[in-house]
Each structure stands twice: as C-alpha cells, then as structure tokens.
C-alpha cells in the first residue's frame, strides 16, 4: 500500500456514539497490541449501503458500523473507522495501519493462510441491471456481456472462474471492468458503461428497492463474510466479545434488522493459521 493511498483514506468517528463508549472500564486489549492506545481502529469501505455507508455529513452508518461500535464498547475501547479501498485493506492490516478489517472480507482458503478471520455474515453474489436494460435471468445470460465488479474481491474471482466455464462450454466470455468499490461499480452501470453490475445480495437488494436498478440474479456462490485480523491476541479478544453478543441476542437482532443471515449456522468461531 502506498503512502498516497493512505493519505486518501479518511478517519471517521460516529458522532455521539463514540463518546458514549468511553466507559470507566478496563480495556480488554492491551495498548501495546493496538494501532492507537485505547482505540479499536477498523478499516471499512463505506460504499455499500446498507452494510456500510457515509451520509452527506460524513456520519457512518450500516450493519458493519453498528457492529464495530458495539465491539469497541464491549472491549472498553473507542471506535475509530478508517475509510479505504478493498485493495489496501490486507496490506494495511499487515502494516499495522488498523487492528481490524471490518468490511466483510469473504473467507477463502488463501486468506485463512495469512489472516485470522471470524465468519459471521452470510453473503452471496448478485447481478444488477438497469431497469430497462439487459434481460438476465440465468448465469448463462452473462455470456458476452460487459460487467462491472470490485477489483481484487471474491466477486471478481468468481466471475473469472465463470469465464473459464463459459469458454469450456463454447460460450463467449464476459468483458469484466474492475473498479475500486461498489459505488463506482454501480456508477458504471448507471452511466451505461456496462450491462450488469456484480455485487452482494444486500447491496443489490437495496438498489432495487430504490427503483434505480433491477436485482436480476441473487444467491450466487454464497460464502461467509468476516472480521479479519493479523494479531491473534486481538482476534481472540474480539471473538470473545462476538460470542458474548451472539449469546445475549444482540448480534442476531442486528443481523435480522438488516436482513442478513448469520454464517456457520450462527456459531462464532475464530479461524486462521494453525487454528
């Protein structure tokens, strides 16, 4: 990750919610393990309403923001959110720029070799089209079309794998346009630069509810989304807090509010190297 990329990130607080978590209790993670003493620093991508997004005044909202605030509260820390692109998240974590990736990184075998991950949200890939655009009712209908998705993510990987399948079946591959985040993925669709946008179910569902796009396909290649860490002790402390909020009902209620199902049948487990 370049210095320029970091400079283009913005640190957000969550208004009064941040002050509310400054409780008189002992932090459950030692300052020596944290990016900033007394703070849980989390990388987010606020471009995915309703999962994480920024209002016009910079206030962060969404499922992952509420989760991050509650985690910090239970750990007796102050929540700090850093907005950044997905491509910078793992390098930034490895470089000590943040403590947690709170962006629903898809759990893959490759990532589990280098990251500690807590799968908690069940996500699947969706296809969106313009309301009067391409008729897409099956995966095969994507053949030969120009599509947009986020660079370096699970969706890009699955679309490239689908292209291999298309070519093996004698079908024309998709022309895949890559963008830094889902906001620009959908901007490309809005501008007519692509015929379909590839995102995740909650994002595509929300865009359909606004009436701007059609949620053409959903539930594709379902896989867990996670909180991700580089430090095992930090990961274990967060896992304990997640298990607590799962057992007392806070986490299931949050997930239900956003219409997102829990991964791993609702069990909270830490996964990663040698675990």
Image (cartoon, grey):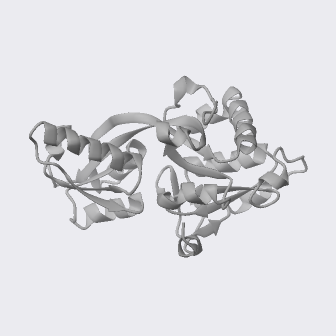
On screen, residue 219 above or below 180? above
Percent of width and height locating residue 116: 62, 40
Displayed quadrant of residue 79: bottom right
The one nearer the camera, 213 or 152, is 152
Quadrant location of the N terminus in the rendered image:
bottom right
The one nearer the camera, 233 or 104, is 233
Percent of width and height locating residue 182: 40, 58
Displayed quadrant of residue 154: top left
Query: Would you say residue 21 is visible in this rendering?
Result: no
Displayed quadrant of residue 97: bottom right
In the displayed structure image, the side of residue 106 where residue 78 appears, left or right: right
In the displayed structure image, the side of residue 239 where residue 150 appears, left or right: left
Across the whole image, how many numbered discs are drawn on residues?
A: 0
On screen, residue 200 above or below 57? above
At x 73%, y 44%, the residue is 234
Percent of width and height locating residue 115: 59, 43
Quadrant location of the C terminus in the rendered image:
top right
At x 71%, y 28%, the residue is 248
At x 34%, y 50%, the residue is 156
Residue that protrudes farthest toward the left in the picture:
170
Query: Would you say residue 127 is visible in this rendering?
Result: yes
The one nearer the camera, 152 or 15, is 152
In the displayed structure image, the side of residue 199 where residue 119 appears, left or right: right
Percent of width and height locating residue 160: 28, 47
At x 32%, y 43%, the residue is 158
């Amino acid at each position: 990750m370049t210095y320029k990329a970091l400079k283009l990130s913005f640190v957000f607080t969550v208004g009064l919610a941040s002050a509310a978590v400054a409780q008189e209790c002992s932090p459950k993670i030692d300052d020596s393990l944290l990016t900033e003493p007394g703070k849980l620093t989390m990388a987010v991508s606020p471009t995915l309403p309703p999962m994480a997004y920024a209002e016009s005044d910079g206030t962060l909202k969404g499922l992952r923001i509420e989760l991050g605030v509650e985690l910090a509260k239970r750990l007796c820390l102050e929540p700090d959110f850093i907005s950044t692109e997905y491509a910078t998240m793992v390098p930034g974590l490895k470089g000590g720029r943040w403590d947690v990736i709170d962006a629903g990184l898809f759990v893959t075998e490759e990532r589990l070799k280098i990251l500690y991950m807590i799968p908690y949200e069940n996500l699947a890939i969706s296809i969106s089209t313009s309301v009067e655009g391409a008729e897409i009712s099956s995966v095969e209908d994507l053949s030969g079309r120009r599509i947009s998705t986020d660079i370096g993510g699970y969706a890009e990987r699955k679309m490239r794998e689908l292209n291999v399948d298309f070519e093996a079946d004698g079908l024309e591959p998709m022309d895949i346009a890559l963008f830094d985040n889902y906001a620009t993925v959908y901007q490309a669709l809005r501008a007519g630069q692509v015929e379909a946008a590839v995102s995740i179910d909650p994002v595509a569902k929300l865009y359909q509810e606004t009436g701007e796009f059609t949620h053409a396909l959903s539930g594709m290649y379902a896989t867990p989304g996670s909180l991700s860490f580089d430090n095992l002790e930090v990961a274990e402390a967060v896992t304990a807090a997640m298990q607590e909020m799962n057992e007392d009902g806070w986490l299931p209620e949050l997930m239900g509010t956003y219409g997102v199902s829990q991964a791993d049948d609702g069990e909270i487990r830490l996964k990663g190297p040698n675990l």
